Image (cartoon, helix red, strand yellow):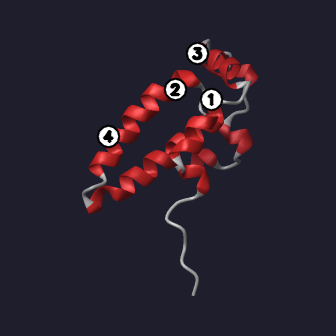
Amino acid sequence: MTAEPLHHAEDDPAEILRVLPERWHEQFLSEYHRALDAAHEVWRFQQLRELLRVWRLHAAAVSDPDFDRAEQAVRAGRREEFVSMEDAFPGWADRR
C-alpha cells in the first residue's frame, strides 16, 4: 500500500509565492501565517490545506497576462467578452 502525500507540490507556499504576482504577497503571507498558527489545533489543519489550494488557484489566475483585462471587462460589465455559464456548461441553471 502506498501512502498518499499530505499535499501536492503546487500547494507548497514557496511555489505559490513564486507564481503569485508581488502585489499579492503580503495578503497571502498574512492569511497563510494565520492559518498556520491555527493549524496547531488538529481540527483546523484542513483549513490550512484549503487556504493553500485556494491561493494556488488564485496565483494561477492572477499570473495569467489576460487576467487584468478580463477583470476590467467584468467590472465594466462588458458581458460580450465572456461566454455565459449556460453556453459553457449546458444545463447549469438546472443544477442550482
Mark 1 packing: few (<14 Cα in 10 Å), some, or many (20+)? some
Are the two marked residues, 2 and 1, in contact with CB atoms closer than 8 angstroms? Answer: yes
**Circle 3 is placed at which residue position?**
75
Splitting the image into 4 quarters, where does residue 33 fall? top left
Residue type, numbered disc 1? Val
Are the two marked residues, 4 and 2, in contact with CB atoms closer than 8 angstroms? Answer: no
Q: Is 94 located above or below residue 20 in the figure?
A: below
Drawn side of residue 23 relative to residue 91, left or right: left
Are the two marked residues, 4 and 3, in contact with CB atoms closer than 8 angstroms? Answer: no
**Circle 1 is placed at which residue position?**
62
**Circle 4 is placed at which residue position?**
34
Mark nearest the camera among 1 and 4 is 4
Give the residue drawn at x 68%, y 25%: 67
Residue type, numbered disc 2? Trp
Q: Earlier in the sequence, mark 4 or mark 3?
A: 4
**Circle 2 is placed at which residue position?**
24
**Outermost residue, top side:** 76
Task: Report x, y in % for residue 20.
Answer: 59, 32
Q: Is 85 located above or below residue 66 in the figure?
A: below
Give the residue drawn at x 73%, y 32%: 83
